[in-house]
Amino acid sequence: MRENNKVNRRALFSGASAQSTYAALPLLETVDVLIVGGGPAGIGAALAAKQQGASCLLVESFSFFGGSAVWGMGRPLEQMRPDGKPRSAIHEMVIEQLMAQGDQSVRIENDRLYPQVHFLKAALADALDAANCPYLVHVQAVDACVQGSRVSGVVLATKQGLMRVDAKVVVDCTGEASVACFAGAKMQEAPDAVPMNLGAAYVDLDLAAVKEGDVAEAIDQAWEKNPLLPETVTGLKQVANGTFAYMEHDGVSNFDSLDPKQRSEAECRSRRQIVQMERAMRASSAEALQDIDICEGAPQLSVSMPRRLKGLYTLTPKDVSGHTMFSDTVAVRFDVSGRCGIPFRTMLPELDGLIVAGAGISAANDAVSMAAGNCIATGHAAGLAAALSAKKGIMPRKLHVAEVQDALRKDGVDLNV
């Protein structure tokens, strides 16, 4: 295990120098609520904050929204409609915009949505536009602006250089609690190396003719010529209602996802890995695989154990297995074994002016959830709380949680376990 904060950024950049430098940066925008990261949590936070009447801005480092929901290349968005029932008004906004893209856009099975990711990208932009929520893409948050013990904005890398966005409340939906880390918040110890997976989609195959075990057998027979093949391959599964498939495999491991050199090596190895998987399948004795071709690889690796906040409370495996309910529950974590409450405290660092949502909340390794539906739920709660905080002129942890809970219930959220 290693500590993420070996060097404390606030100590490194302490004093007047850093803050005076940041204050001198061009001011891009001043808003009530700034949401950093346009994955499922960020979409939930932005829609919720705007619905509460806050002035807000969503910033995303890629050229599209969706985050890990897109990187799966067609893998299901889980826990979007648990037991087939609507989960919240925010979840339904996303689903309705995706379904409006047409029959090719999504296949819905129980709690899961199997999306065609290019339709998903369009649907999420449409959802933001329908809510009149401003956003920027191709901007990277590279540091937090901190005044005393309060996060007051972020520094963005843009095509015109560094710029600053000031906000009453910042919602960190980066998936790795990056803004919280930049601000000097306490972070949980992370494993030295975690499994990572590069999503890939394949075309030119007859899915109906692919037999169970065909892909695994093809991989087993191709190790000598393709040494980067993964040890475990579940197989090919249909993307939405289309004629192509995404691949389930175990990816690469023994790399530190936060170390720039190791992350670079892992990314490039994974690119070679999906090519070798295609070669292995084309060389297979299974006729249905012999013309297969790579359609697309994900823009980046998915990390199974992302960096996470050490908040005012850490969700534990016992909480999850015991279906624990908390007095400050603001979201519900669904999984195959049931559900448990997610307390507001898991989203709050000791710093003011900041709320963390999505995969980066304070949760133990066996309690973290990457399910899109759960990330939207914590984003929904965070965006709503941020808007209320800005409206009242108080810090998020000074909010009466009952007020946040009442507002969530009005949005159709069931906070009972």
Image (cartoon, rainbow, N blue to C red):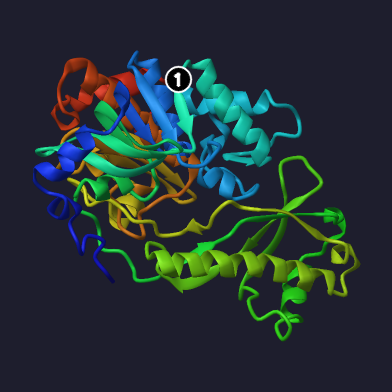
For image coordinates 16% across by 19% down, the residue present is 393
Does residue 209 appear to the left or right of 16 in the view shown? Answer: right
The vertical placement of 167 against 222, above or below, is above
- Percent x, y of residue 24: 22, 33
Does residue 344 appear to the left or right of 252 in the view shown? Answer: left
For image coordinates 45% across by 51% down, the residue present is 337
Q: Residue furthest bottom?
A: 224
Q: Which residue is mark 1?
A: 133
Does residue 294 appear to the left or right of 148 in the view shown? Answer: right
- Percent x, y of residue 125: 56, 27
Residue type beneath disc 1? Cys
For image coordinates 16% across by 55% down, the residue present is 12
- Percent x, y of residue 261: 42, 68
Between 365 and 85, the one lying in front of the other is: 365
The vertical placement of 396 against 231, above or below, is above
Number of marks: 1
Q: Residue furthest right?
A: 287
- Percent x, y of residue 99: 66, 27
Mark 1: few/some/many CA within 10 Å (<14, 14-19, 20+): many
Give the position of the N terminus as an image quadrant: bottom left
Q: Can residue 246 be seen? A: yes
For image coordinates 63% across by 29% down, the residue present is 98
Q: On the image, which quarter does residue 355 sit in?
A: top left
Give the position of the C terminus as an image quadrant: top left
Q: Can residue 107 be seen? A: no
Element type at mark 1 = loop
